[in-house]
Structure formats: structure tokens, C-alpha cells
Amino acid sequence: MPRLSSKIALADTNILMYSVMQKIDLIGEVKSLGFNLVTSKCVMEELEKLSGRNLSAKIAMNVYSGIEVVGGEGAGDDCVLDACTKNSLVLISNDRILCDRAMKKGIAVLNIEDGRKLTWRR
């Protein structure tokens, strides 16, 4: 496991929607690793935009409406990476491209493997 300066993990849009679709207790999984779960303003905005046509996005908005929201500059993935960098956060995502970009920036990444468990991406 990487050495981390923060015990906070930021969830991106796809992981929030995936956890709803697969009925995964993401908050519980994150806590079991000793982290608190947050997301970014741009992720919540994307969920809101998608919620008009995507039931998983709508449910994810409701399920995760109580978690802390942090800021970030830019749009989409750039905003997520900016929030992680500025706040020394771990990223939780199953988006391969986003995970690769994060790791190149030195951001630790967790993703869901075997359908249910959070694991460190290497």
C-alpha cells in the first residue's frame, strides 16, 4: 500500500454510478481501508446532468448527497485530478484513462476489482 499524506479518497462519477448499479457499499468499503469518502463539485454536476436520462446517476446523486464535496479547477477529469492534487487525495475510479493520468501525476488510485472490493491500482 502506498504511503499517503491524506486519509481521504475522492470518488469520480463512474465509481459512484457503478457502486449503485452493483449494490456496493462504497462508503463502507472506503471506511474499511481507513479513508473518508468525498467527491468533487464537478462530479456532482456531472451526476446531475446525467440524472435526467440515467437512473444510476439519479440514484447516485441521492445516495451520495451527504458526502463532502471539494472543489477543483477545470472540467471533467481535469477537475477531478486538480482536486486530488490540491488536497492530497486518493482517487477512486474504474476509468482506466483517468487512473493512468492520476498515477502519472503521483496520485494513489483505488478501483473495484472482482466486482466488489476496493484494491490499490498499480
Image: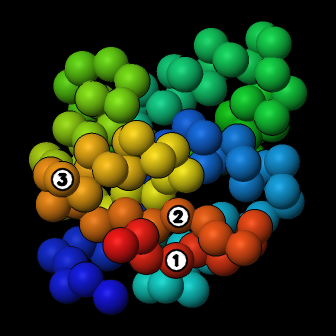
Q: Residues within 10 Å of mark 1 (few under 14, many from 20)?
A: some
Residue shown at 25% from the left, 57% from the top: 103
Residue shown at 27% from the left, 29% from the top: 78
Mark 1 or mark 2: whose residue is earlier in sequence: 2
Q: Nearer the viewer, residue 116 or 10?
A: 116
* Mark linked to residue 119: 1
Looking at the picture, which amino acid does disc 3 mark? Lys
Q: Comparing marks 2 and 3, which lies closer to the viewer?
A: 3
Q: Is residue 24 above or below residue 54?
A: below
Residue indicated by mark 3: 104
Quadrant in the picture for residue 65: top right
Query: Residue 17, position in %: x, y?
Result: 70, 42
Left or right: where 80 falls relative to 4: right
Residues under numbered marks 3 and 1 in contact, where contact means CB atoms less than 8 Å apart? no
Quadrant in the picture for residue 46: top right
* Mark linked to residue 111: 2
Q: In which quadrant is the C terminus drawn?
A: bottom left
How far, Cα to Cα, is label 2 from label 3? 16 Å
Q: Residues within 10 Å of mark 2 (few under 14, many from 20)?
A: many
Residues under numbered marks 1 and 2 in contact, where contact means CB atoms less than 8 Å apart? yes
Query: Residue 95, position in %: x, y?
Result: 51, 44
Q: For residue 8, say whether it is visible.
A: no
